[in-house]
Amino acid sequence: MNKTICELFAGVGGFRLGFERLNSGWETIWFSQWEPGARTQWAHDCYVSHFGDSKDMNDEIHTGEDISTMDKNAIPDHSLLVGGFPCQDYSVAHTLASSKGIEGKKGVLWWQIRDTLIAKNAPFCIFENVDRLLKSPAKQRGRDFGVILACLNELGYAVEWRVVNAAVYGAAQRRRRTFIFAYKKDTNYGLEQIRKAPESIILSEGLMSKAFPIEKAKEITETDIPTDIVEVSDKFAFDFRPAGYMVDGHVYTTDVVEKEEKPILLGEILQRNVDDSFYITDEARMAKWVYLKGAKKIPRVSSTGHEYVFSEGPVAFPDPWDRPGRTMLTSESTLNRSTHVVTDPGTGKLRTLTPTEAERLQGFDDEWTNSGMPQRMRFFCMGNALVVPMITRMGRILDSIIANEP
């Protein structure tokens, strides 16, 4: 089997970089990155500056366009489909043309993945999403992930998943993300896994358990995913846990105790004596930072007239050097509660992170996004990115799986 990758929702190339660091022969043959409403496609341009562009099977370039307009049959064949797609409303309805057809809400990007799977039939897939995917929406918990599993089951895939805190597995950021590994049941790997006990796949025999080792699994809960995706959308709810496995529509899921590794500490990635623009020197701004980071109890009135107290606890200020960084958001470096504020190792003064430090939090090479984009966009792209070493960990296990495929 050729080690070829198609990367959807590619951002600045975290999946690709993670696989290329393996130096094991992976080739990304097509990608797509498009930011809706953006006049300049900064992430796409950054990706191309590192890797070059990709032509489709019609010898045309459409990598920086809306993926929904792409003819999926023109995407080059690949053995691995990857993508970090956003958590959205995955509800569906029957189409008017056919009671068997389904129609998702416009702009929901999961359907672009599904359409690509239908067109190209990739034997293996790795997807990334936020940790709350397993529990959304709040009024029908588990429905959205259930829709995804139902789609994959319908297309002949078995699925493993894990919610991974990157810092637990040696990274510099306490970033929790859901990783999904789907594979065709008729691959050699699929045929081997089907013969194993589901508990062993979750504990030690699956790609996820090998990439992200665990000490033990707790009691497993089970359920069946309906075969009708619309029924899943309308009625299905289930308490998915952070680790799980699905085959033939039957779900096994549990909490796990992870084998923790030594993380990279925030103090280890900090630069010294950075540019003056990053320091907090204005007294009024400093007072605002103190307020935003502090504990609060604020009386409020809801739209229905209900009075309540909004409360939140304090955020460490400044962020401690002896822990991994907190989850970085797209708003990093702006004046808000979630932005990291650190003590500069050289000057001892308080400041925000530099773009290079943001890249280090995500495990990218230094100056990865220094490709002409504005500084605010460098932070935005890193806030959207994934933790690259987590991809390399999964890729290392996938290397051994691919080696056993014809």
Image (cartoon, rainbow, N blue to C red):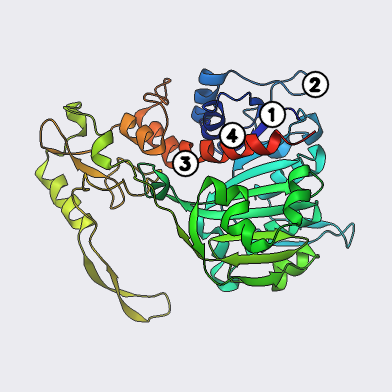
Q: Identify whether 135 is placed above or below 381.
A: below
**Residue underneath mark 2:** 58
Q: Is residue 105 left or right of residue 359?
A: right
Specify the label residue 224 is tagged with.
none
Q: Quadrant of residue 198?
A: bottom right
Secondary structure of the residue carrying numbered label 4: loop
Q: Residue at x 37, y 23 (%)?
A: 367
Q: Residues within 10 Å of mark 1 (few under 14, many from 20)?
A: some
Would residue 103 be found to the left or right of residue 133 on screen? Answer: right
* Residue annotated with mark 3: 384
- Residue 3's label in the rendered image is 1
What's under tag 3, amino acid-wise?
A: Asn
For the residue marked with disc 2, what is the amino acid? Asn
Residues under labels 2 and 4: Cα distance? 20 Å
Give how far apart the Cα atoms at labels 3 and 4 are. Answer: 13 Å
Q: Residues within 10 Å of mark 3 (few under 14, many from 20)?
A: some
